């Protein structure tokens, strides 16, 4: 079961994330029957939640992170817990188009305190988070380019300590399934 907290900017009732999730894990432990820790994974980005996940779940599932965050998360988790992240990919070879697609997808997240804090902790600046996101931010969070370039990004995550990568393909049109993009990527992703 994937567990995470919402955002103060969009939730009607919001509690400090770490304490709220820790209390929820306590309730799961006290349930009859309890939900075993091996059946739980936490959507975590920061040090407190990552340590909580390592201690009380099977691992973490970070979203909108780059390979540098993956390496940091693995160092926080140690060798045992699962590190199962999401990587958004944009099958464009034109930098301008790829980054425009990424910025459209990223826009709702740029105003959320939890994501902003994680990116700032990861070495980005307030300027990187402005104007739709700097090229540096976009290029760290999104894999774009030819299929082999996208596969190379997934390899970077694996080398940084990822156990599993959920690939999300984003194209110009959010109204249609990216079937052709998946077909184009499949041979490279299977080889990665």
Image (cartoon, rainbow, N blue to C red):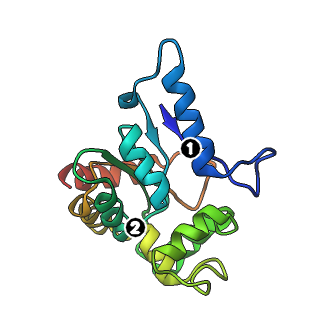
Q: Residue furthest top?
A: 32
The residue lying at 58 percent from left, 34 percent from top is 24
The residue lying at 33 percent from left, 59 percent from top is 76
Mark 2 to mark 1 CA distance (whole Å): 19 Å
**Label 1, on which residue?**
4
Q: Nearer the viewer, mark 2 or mark 1?
A: 1
The C terminus sits in image quarter: bottom left
The residue lying at 42 percent from left, 73 percent from top is 140
Q: Position of residue 152 (x, y in %)?
A: 25, 66
Q: Is residue 173 left or right of residue 141?
A: right
Q: Position of residue 93 (x, y in %)?
A: 40, 74
Q: Position of residue 154 (x, y in %)?
A: 29, 60
C-beta proximity under 8 Å, tags 2 and 1: no
Q: Is residue 135 above or below residue 145?
A: below
Crowding at label 2, few (<14), some or many (≥20) Cα neighbours within 10 Å? many
Counting residues from the N terminus, which is met first, the one under dot 2 or under dot 1? 1
The residue lying at 34 percent from left, 66 percent from top is 72
Label 1: element kind: loop
Q: Residue furthest left?
A: 191
**Label 2, on which residue?**
66
Q: Is residue 105 above or below residue 93?
A: above
* Image quadrant in which you'd find residue 73: bottom left
Q: Position of residue 13 (x, y in %)?
A: 79, 44
Q: Residue furthest right?
A: 12
Label 2: element kind: loop
Give the number of callouts.
Answer: 2
Front-lying residue, 146 or 1: 1
Q: Is residue 158 left or right of residue 119?
A: left
Crowding at label 1, few (<14), some or many (≥20) Cα neighbours within 10 Å? some
């Amino acid at each position: 079961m994937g567990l995470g907290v919402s955002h103060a900017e969009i939730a009607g009732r919001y509690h400090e994330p770490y304490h709220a999730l820790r209390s929820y894990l306590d309730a799961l432990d006290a349930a009859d029957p309890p939900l075993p820790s091996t059946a739980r994974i936490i959507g975590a980005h920061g040090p407190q939640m990552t340590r909580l996940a390592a201690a009380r779940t099977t691992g973490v599932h970070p979203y909108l992170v780059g390979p540098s965050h993956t390496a940091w998360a693995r160092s926080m988790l140690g060798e045992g817990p699962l590190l199962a992240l999401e990587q958004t990919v944009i099958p464009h070879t034109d930098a301008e188009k790829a980054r425009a697609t990424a910025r459209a997808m990223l826009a709702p997240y740029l105003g959320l305190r939890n994501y902003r804090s994680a990116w700032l902790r990861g070495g980005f600046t307030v300027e990187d988070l402005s104007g739709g996101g700097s090229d540096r931010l976009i290029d760290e969070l999104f894999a774009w380019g030819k299929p082999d370039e996208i596969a190379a990004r997934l390899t970077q995550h694996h080398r940084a300590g990822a156990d599993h990568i959920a690939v999300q393909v984003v194209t110009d049109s959010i109204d249609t399934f990216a079937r052709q993009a998946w077909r184009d990527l499949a041979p490279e992703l299977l080889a990665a």
